Amino acid sequence: MAIVHKGASIVPTKTEMVTEWMPRQRWYHGKGHVPQLRRVGGFRFEDPEGEVGCETLLLADETVTPAVVYQVPLTYRPSPLEGGEHALLGTMEHSVLGTRWVYDAPHDPVYVGQLMATILGSGVSDEAQASSGSNALATGSSTGHAHGSVSSATVLSGEQSNTSIICRMTAPGGGPAEPVIVKVFRTLQDGENPDVVVQSALTAEGSDRVPMAIGHLSGAWDSPVGGSPMHGHLAFAQEFIPGVEDAWRVALVAAASGADFTERARDLGVVTAEIHGALAHSLGTHEVTPEAREAVVASMRQRYAAAVALVPELDSCSAAVERVVASVRDVHWPPLQRIHGDYHLGQVLDVPERGWVALDFEGEPLRPLTERVRPDLTARDVAGMLRSFDYAAGSVALAEAPVDATAWAAACRAVFLDGYASVAGAPDADAQALIRALELDKALYEVVYEARNRPTWLPIPLGAVERLTTEEGTP
């Protein structure tokens, strides 16, 4: 149990220090605002050496409605952490302990070691220090990885919403163990994170088509708006696969050179169907309700309206879009199930001697958690990958490469569907209509994104909208 010095004064306070630091972090949602932070929970890890304080603050930012809950792990040191200048929040004066150097904890080896020890089951955390006094526990859960210890750790740069740490591990016997990557979720939501649930389910099924799930850390905190405490995942550890490229980079090189990619695209279709089959077996399926069908139709119409608002010339194809959207009302739907939810070439690794390995099952990160954990059509993942092949070809065209990759993309799309059908069964006319409608929905989403962020890329999704709304348009 960590020692807490009751009655001690701290200047500046922890919340004051985090308030000044948080707006500069990539994972902070309230850009342009000064956070208004209120503590809703927290917990401590104990340093075996008794030197470093390891505390995780769970803080609600009330500058937005509803309030956003952030996870902010901190370490408090009696002297500077060597090489840790980039992670330093500042110094505080503790009335008992004196000057303390405060760090963003994922960059501190003591925190990382105790985080992994807790996830693997060989470490402990004290009770969460919730502002209302609720007794919530941060608990680790391991899926069977051999217990070991962290020998060194590196934080990945460039992430927008989480903090991922690559941990080089030492086995219990002293030799090296397989590396682990642990993702610390910075924004917390009430409920189970789909990345944890889906990958853990696939690991339990024995699938090697995803990185092996190692374990996770869960916790509870007070609801920012009152009521029952909230519960959710705080961190997730999984197998780290070093030195590999994602499928986007591999496909882009092939498209730019005109190299044949059909065998790899077909394999990707096979892998996708295998993942869907394992998820259906592990997490079950759900019959379609009229409400679910209507929700999809309404969402597609809203997507089209948003695209027309930004690109008015799309108004000319309103009748054709409505025909495609309305078609999903009249066709047979397969049972709904858990899917990837944000499936594209960038979410797949090319692993030598293992093949394609899919990752990041969180779904579209900007969607609410309640939507991301909702069972959906497997055709949504299929449509997402079809759009990704189209984007690879479009990127080549934008780069003014001497190769026209249009035929390359069409061939990849066709064999991807063939590979998927070889496992899941050949799609009938209804299934083809669903794929086409969901691909159009994705293309309209891309129109909105590109119009707002990368106007020079607009021709890629606009070309897809034209193709998918013509009589000869097919998936």
Image (cartoon, rainbow, N blue to C red):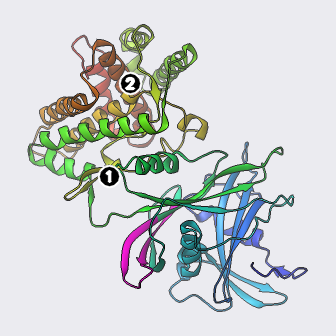
Query: Quadrant of the rendered structure where residue 128 is?
Result: bottom right
Q: Earlier in the sequence, mark 2 or mark 1?
A: 1
Camera sees residue 97: yes
Counting from the top left corner in percent of width and height, residue 339 is at: 43, 36
Q: In this figure, which residue is indicated by the disc labeled 2?
A: 438
Locate residue 394 relative to residue 172 in the image: left or right. Answer: left
Q: Secondary structure at mark 1?
A: loop
| Nearer to us in this view, 323 or 43 | 43
On the rendered image, what quadrant is the N terminus found in?
Answer: bottom right
Kindly identify which residue carries mark 1.
Answer: 208
**Residue 186 quadrant:** bottom right
Q: Quadrant of residue 444?
A: top left
The secondary structure that dominates the magenta segment is strand
Of residue 105 and residue 177, the one placed in the foreground of this image is 177
**Residue 224 among those drawn in magenta:** no
Q: Which residues, given as a range, are shown in magenta?
A: 163-181
Nearer the observer: mark 2 or 1; the answer is 1
Q: Is residue 166 magenta?
A: yes
Q: Residue at x 45, y 80 (%)?
A: 172
Query: Disc 1 residue type?
Result: Asp
Residue 216, position in %: x, y?
55, 59
Quadrant (top left, top right, bottom left, bottom right) of the C terminus: top left
**Image mark count:** 2
Q: The residue under label 2 is which amino acid type?
A: Leu
- Secondary structure category for the residue under label 2: helix
How far is disc 2 from disc 1 in space, using C-alphas? 28 Å
In the displayed structure, 105 sits above or below 191; it is below
